[in-house]
Amino acid sequence: MPADRIVVHGSAGRDVAPDVAVLRAVVVEVDADRRQAFERCGSRVESLVPVLRTAVSDDGEVTTGQVSLDRYFERVDDKGPPRYAASCALAAECSPARAADVVAAAVTGGIDELTGPRYSVRNRAPVIEELLDEAVEAARRKAQRLARAAERRLGAVVAMEEGGLGRSDLPSIDAYDDPEMTVALSAGAGRVELQPAHVRVTVSVRVAFALGGAQADAAATRSTN
């Protein structure tokens, strides 16, 4: 690092109320006949999709992946006749208020695996723009403190880097959601009460400031003038 500059990190974060919840589900069918496993899995997905679409309501969305077929082993040393597992993943996106209804619908529909809800914010841009100002100011305060400790004058910003890595002149925007909750299917088909988590949005910047001469020299220069 050049002697005439100082590089510091600044960060800022805010808890934001989520406006979307995402749940991921998997349908699995196992059979010695690969075609039977494939067809039963596809049939279950076809019957489950409209149930989930009703649960997410008009402002939600349900998407599915392709049905995949793989050799199925109950144990690593399984030497029995070959069996096959057909599986298909589904994702349901809805408002946080409808997440409990989606969980109940998925459990009632006989889903095999269910993960979520994972809460998020569709449009983080306004929050991120505000946090960027705060992150740069945090970096400036840190730089000012270090400059005073070194008895140097703090100058203007000369560079920024994304999280201190890679491309220059760009801030790092790291958005973190609260950990997703795994729903136990043994809970039954009743409505599960869910409390939406706050979404933590954070940004970080790495800022380089110019360093001027010693503070004492600056004061002496002013006095002679």
Image: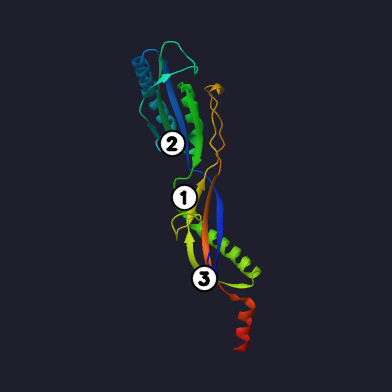
Q: Is residue 44 left or right of residue 6?
A: left
Please give the name of the residue rendered at 37% of the width and 30% of the height, measured from the top-left corner: 65
Q: Residues within 10 Å of mark 2 (few under 14, many from 20)?
A: many
Three-letter code, disc 3 = Ala
| Nearer the camera: disc 1 or disc 3 | 3
Task: Compare marks 3 and 2 and give the one earlier in the sequence.
Answer: 2
Real-space CA distance between mark 1 and mark 2, rounded to the nearest whole angstrom? 17 Å
On screen, 50 above or below 125?
above
Task: Compare marks 1 and 2 and give the one earlier in the sequence.
Answer: 2
Please give the name of the residue rendered at 46% of the width and 18% of the height, measured from the top-left corner: 73
* Residue located farthest toward the top when viewing the structure as drawn: 81
Real-space CA distance between mark 1 and mark 3, rounded to the nearest whole angstrom? 29 Å
Q: Nearer the viewer, residue 190 or 177?
A: 177
Please give the name of the residue rendered at 36% of the width and 16% of the height, measured from the top-left corner: 34
Three-letter code, disc 2 = Glu
Real-space CA distance between mark 3 and mark 2, rounded to the nearest whole angstrom? 45 Å
- Give the numbered dot on residue 93: 2
Residue beneath disc 3: 156
Residue beneath disc 1: 124
Q: Residues within 10 Å of mark 1 (few under 14, many from 20)?
A: few
Check disc 1 and report its element: helix, strand or loop: loop
Task: Compare marks 1 and 3 and give the one earlier in the sequence.
Answer: 1
Q: Nearer the viewer, residue 206 or 99?
A: 206
| Nearer the camera: disc 3 or disc 2 | 3
